[in-house]
Amino acid sequence: MDLRWLLVILMSLIVIAVIWRDMNGMGNMPWSKCKESLFTQVTTGECTLRFKADLISS
């Protein structure tokens, strides 16, 4: 299989997944409520909430 077709298929799957998530009202991922990057959250365990109203379930 040509590499170009593999990239097209992967990008199409990502687009479909984003649309699916939006249509089902699933909301944001819990890790996106933090100011730190995902890498920083995994390595240090820190999470400073972006907004006061956000809660992260354990």
Image (cartoon, rainbow, N blue to C red):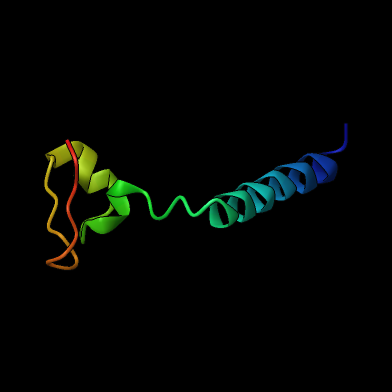
Place residue 33 in its image quadrant: bottom left
Horizontal side of 55 relative to 30 (left or right) equals left
Residue appearing at x 17%, y 68% in the figure = 51
Would you place residue 39 above or below residue 53 in this image?
above
Q: Residue furthest bottom?
A: 51
- Residue 14's spot in the image, x, y percent? 64, 48
- Image quadrant holding the N terminus, namely top right
Horizontal side of 50 relative to 29 (left or right) equals left
Q: Residue furthest front?
A: 24
- Image quadrant holding the C terminus, namely top left
- Residue 43's spot in the image, x, y percent? 19, 38
Would you place residue 22 above or below residue 44 in this image?
below
Q: Residue furthest top?
A: 1
Horizontal side of 45 relative to 28 (left or right) equals left
- Residue 32's spot in the image, x, y percent? 31, 55
- Residue 52's spot in the image, x, y percent? 12, 67
Instruction: Judge by depth and name the residue closer to the eye, 29 or 2.
Output: 29
Residue appearing at x 62%, y 49% in the figure = 20
